[in-house]
């Protein structure tokens, strides 16, 4: 069985982030430039800190690719942290002669307190360096590799911003993706984009932060990925876990999500259309409230996953807290911080969805080489269609 695995390592202000992606078939064209495109998209979005401007992320391919094609071996990627020089002593691997400043003013909303208790640290930096969403640069690099594979099968994974704070975009059908990519907040509606920008400015001016909702669309996904037969093979569950694992995501919806709970059954499900209305794609639906998944299996409609982010926890006007060493009242530690990251979280959501979909594609179609995966895919696709009339 071909299985996809990926593992990231590295601290936010360490020397580099690294990621190994295993299970990608041989023969897939892959370049550093392709991965760089998604890394740039993750760094964009109005509301992010200056670090994103200082640092242009680029993943170096260290293994698993030769002459532009994957080898079927683990793909190793390295993203250098360009701020490393400033942090080389505070984050050095070797023991340090000089005492470095400890982070003890615990930040509510972060892993600082629980992580320090769990791992027995007297310095919250030992937790926050890895708990930081900087790690998602490595996920986006892994996601780009998966996106490259999905492209070979006509699957596209995109995202847009549904809301920032109280500013909510009206979403009707598939967004205009070109408009999304042009928007500073990744929202297709230019007027709503402007209101989102103003809301971020207002939060920034008052030392506050904002959350919001992103939505990921995967189109061209074949019918039949995932399975109803076991709880941990249900693709909706795997997608929810992947989206929820993104820093600050506190809610996940598939398709109509929570709104379906208040909708009568007659208006909540997706009618299956007869053959003459199929157009280019088999087994079409009149609507896609299920977000492309029924019984944990893709049904051929676009897969739609939403993630709701809480507002950023580190505030320029810090929250009251306590000191890790004395448990006395202090103001939380402040370190250069984003004000709103919903647009970036959408790009990370794309990566997580791409990774889960590739896992499901390889589970279904397998293959050590791209040609073999394609043969298996095409052989299966031929079998999709009406099963004939009963005698
Ligand atoms: C792209 C991205 C960037 C983030 N940047 C920051 C930041 O600059 N400051 C901050 O306090 N939290 C930031 N967060 C959120 C924290 O990483 C997150 O809230 C924290 O690790 C606690 O995890 P939890 O919210 O999932 O419980 C960011 C999240 C994402 C997705």
Image: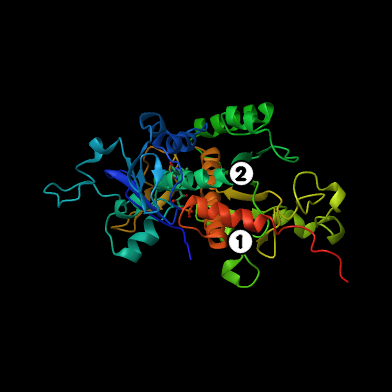
The structure residue drawn at horizontal position 65% and vertical position 53%, both measured from the top left corner, is: 222
Residue 248 place in picture, x, y as percent: 51, 50
Is residue 360 found left or right of 88 in the rendered image? right
Is residue 243 found left or right of 221 in the rendered image? left
Q: Quadrant of residue 141?
A: top left
Residue 330 place in picture, x, y as percent: 36, 49
Is residue 4 found left or right of 289 in the rendered image? left
The structure residue drawn at horizontal position 45% and vertical position 53%, both measured from the top left corner, is: 24
Q: Residues within 10 Å of mark 1 (few under 14, many from 20)?
A: many
> Disc 1 beta carbon < 8 A from ligand 1?
no
Could you say which is closer to the camera, residue 337 or residue 32? 32
Could you say which is closer to the camera, residue 240 or residue 354? 354
Residue behind mark 2: 154
**N-terminal of the two: label 2 or label 1?**
2
Q: Quadrant of residue 235?
A: bottom right
**Quadrant in which the C terminus appears:** bottom right
Rendered position, 254 above or below 37: below
Is residue 242 found left or right of 270 in the rendered image? left
Rendered position, 277 above or below 295: above
Could you say which is closer to the camera, residue 282 or residue 161? 282
Label 2, label 1: how far apart the Cα atoms are: 19 Å
The answer, for residue 15, to whether it is visible in the render is: yes
Any mark on residue 352, and which? none
Residue behind mark 1: 235
Q: In terms of secondary structure, where does tag 2 sit? A: loop
Q: Residues within 10 Å of mark 2 (few under 14, many from 20)?
A: few
């Amino acid at each position: 069985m071909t299985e996809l695995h990926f593992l990231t390592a590295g601290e936010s202000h360490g020397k580099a982030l690294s990621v190994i992606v295993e299970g990608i078939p041989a023969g897939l064209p892959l370049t550093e430039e392709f991965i760089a495109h998604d890394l740039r998209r993750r760094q964009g979005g109005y509301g992010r800190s200056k670090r994103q401007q200082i640092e242009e992320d680029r993943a170096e391919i260290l293994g698993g690719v030769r002459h532009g094609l994957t080898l079927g071996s683990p793909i190793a990627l390295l993203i250098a942290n360009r701020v490393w020089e400033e942090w080389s002593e505070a984050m050095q691997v070797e023991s340090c002669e000089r005492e470095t400043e400890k982070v003890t003013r615990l930040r509510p909303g972060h892993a600082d307190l629980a992580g320090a208790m769990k791992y027995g640290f007297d310095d919250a930096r030992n937790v926050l360096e890895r708990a930081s969403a900087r790690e998602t640069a490595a996920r986006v690099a892994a996601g780009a590799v998966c996106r490259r594979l999905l492209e070979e099968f006509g699957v596209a994974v995109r995202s847009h911003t549904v809301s920032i704070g109280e500013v909510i975009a009206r979403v009707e059908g598939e967004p205009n993706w070109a408009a999304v990519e042009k928007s500073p907040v990744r929202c297709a509606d230019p007027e709503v984009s402007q209101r989102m920008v103003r809301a971020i400015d207002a939060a920034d001016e008052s030392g506050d932060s904002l959350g919001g909702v992103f939505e990921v669309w995967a189109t061209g996904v074949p019918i039949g990925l995932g399975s109803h037969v076991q709880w941990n093979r249900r693709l909706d569950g795997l997608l929810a876990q992947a989206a929820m694992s993104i820093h600050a995501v506190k809610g996940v919806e598939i398709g109509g999500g929570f709104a379906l709970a208040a909708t009568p059954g007659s208006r909540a499900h997706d009618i299956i259309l007869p053959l003459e209305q199929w157009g280019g794609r088999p087994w079409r639906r009149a609507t896609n409230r299920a977000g492309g998944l029924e019984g944990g299996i893709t049904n051929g409609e676009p897969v739609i996953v939403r993630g709701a982010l809480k507002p950023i926890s580190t505030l320029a006007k810090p929250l009251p807290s306590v000191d890790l060493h004395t448990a006395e009242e202090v103001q939380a530690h402040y370190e250069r911080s984003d004000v709103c990251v919903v647009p970036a979280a959408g790009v990370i959501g794309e990566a997580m969805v791409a990774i889960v979909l590739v896992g499901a594609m390889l589970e279904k179609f397998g293959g050590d080489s791209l040609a073999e995966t394609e043969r298996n895919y095409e052989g299966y696709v031929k079998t999709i269609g009406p099963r004939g009339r009963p005698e």
